[in-house]
Amino acid sequence: MRGFGETVDLEAALARLVGAVTPLPAEPVGIRDVVGRVLAEDVASGLDVPPFARSAVDGFAVHAEDTFGAAPLAPNELVVVGTSMPGTLPERALQPGEALRIMTGAPLPDGADAVVMVENTDAHGDHGRGARAVRILEAVPPGKHVGRRGEDVKVGDVVLAAGRHLRAADVAVLASIRRATVACHRRPRVAILSSGNELVDPLSDAPAGPTTIFESNGYHLEALVRAEGGVPTRLGIIRDDRDVLRDTIAAAAAEHDVVITTGAVSVGQEDFIPLIVRELGELWVHGVSIRPAHPAGFGRIGEALAFILPGNPVATYVGFWAFVRPALRLLAGRGEGSLAPDRTVRAPLGRKIASQPGRVDFARVRLADDGTVEPVRVGGAGVLTTLTRSDGMVIIPGDVEGIEAGESVEVILF
C-alpha cells in the first residue's frame, strides 16, 4: 500500500530545506531594475560624495575667524565680493575680511571655512567698485553649515554590501556614485502546475459541469511567486494521467529553478506526484506535522527544487509560506535572516484556539476592533475565503494544547 514517507516535524523539514539551497548565480542588473534584487557583490564608490565642499544653507561664505565676537549689537562687517550658485565654481579664493554670498548646494570658495545663515546677517551699503557689505550678527566656528567633500561617501567606501536586499533608497545611492549596473543574484524561475480532472481554468472558454472546480491555486501561486521576486510560469492544469504528469514535471524541472505542483500529493488512487518526484529525482520530505498542508513535501529533480503542495487552497498557501517562500528567498541570495516573518504584531487572544499536541497549527485570525485577536477558522483547508477574511496567521507550537483566551500571541500579518 502506498503511503507517506516518514512524517517529520516543521523544524526538521525546514532545516533539511535550508541546508540544501544555495543562491543562484549572479547577473548584471541596471539600477532601474534592482529594487527587490539581492546584491552578489560589495559595491565600492569610485567617487567622493559630495565631490566638493558646499554650503548647507543660503547665506555668506566666510573665514570663520572674521566672525569671532560678532553679535546683534556689535556686528562684524565684511566686504561682499560676489555670489556662488549651484553648478558654478567661485571665480577666486576668499581673502580675510571678505564674504561671498552663497546658495544652498553651491561650492565654497577656497579660503572659506564656514557659512553664516542669511538670517543672521544684515547685508547693506556699497563699499566702492560695486562691492556691497554684510554685517555678521553671530560668530560661527570653522565648518559651520558646510558639507565637506566626501562627507557622505569617500572614494573606496563600500556603500552597499553583498547580500543586501535592495530598496528604492539604494538606487539613489548607486546613482550618486555613478554606478550604472551591479551584480545581483538571478531571480528564481518557477514553474507552476495544478493537477486534477475536476479542474477548469476560470479564464478559459471550457464549459463548466456539475462537478467542476474553477482552478485558483495556479493564479494564487503565480501572484505569491511574483511577490517574492521570482519569475513564475504557469503550466496550467494537468490531468491525472501519470505519464503526462511525469513528462510535464520532467520538462519543467529541466528549464526552471523551482517546480511547484498542487494536488495529487496524498495517498489516493490518482495521487501520482510523490511517486513521480521519486522517479525523476529525490523526495526529501513527504508529510510534515502541520495543519493544514500535512501532505506537503519537497525534493530535487536534477538542479531544480520540487515542491508538492496539497490541492486545498488554504493548505496550498500554508505550504508555500512554510517551504516555498524560504527557498525562493535563499535562491535569490537573501540569506537565512530573511526567513522570519516580514510583519508581525502582538495582541491578546479574544477566544481560545484549540489544537492537537504533536503538530504545528497555522490558525487564520483577524484583528478585532477591540484590539484582540479573533480566530477565523482553524480547520477547513478548502475554504479559500478564510484567507481574505483574515489579517494573518498565528502559529501554534506542537508542544501545547491550544492557546487560551487572554494570552498574548504573535500574528504573522498577510
Image (spheres, rainbow, N blue to C red):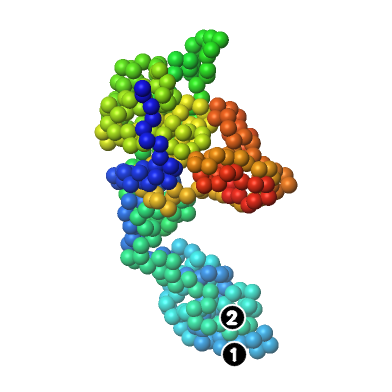
**The residue tagged with tag 1: helix, strand or loop?**
loop
Tell me what residue is drawn at x 60 percent, y 80 percent.
Answer: 134
Residue 2 location (% of width, % of height)? 36, 24
Front residue of 120 and 410: 410
> Which three-letter amino acid code belongs to the residue tagged 2?
Ala
Quarter in which the C terminus is drawn: top right
Residue 277 location (% of width, % of height)? 32, 28
Label 1 vs 2, first from the N-terminus: 1
Residue annotated with mark 1 = 69
Number of numbered markers: 2
Q: Quadrant of residue 9?
A: top left
Front residue of 395 and 90: 395
**The residue tagged with tag 2: helix, strand or loop?**
strand
Which tag is nearer the camera, tag 1 or tag 2?
1
Quarter in which the N terminus is drawn: top left
> Which three-letter amino acid code belongs to the residue tagged 1?
Gly
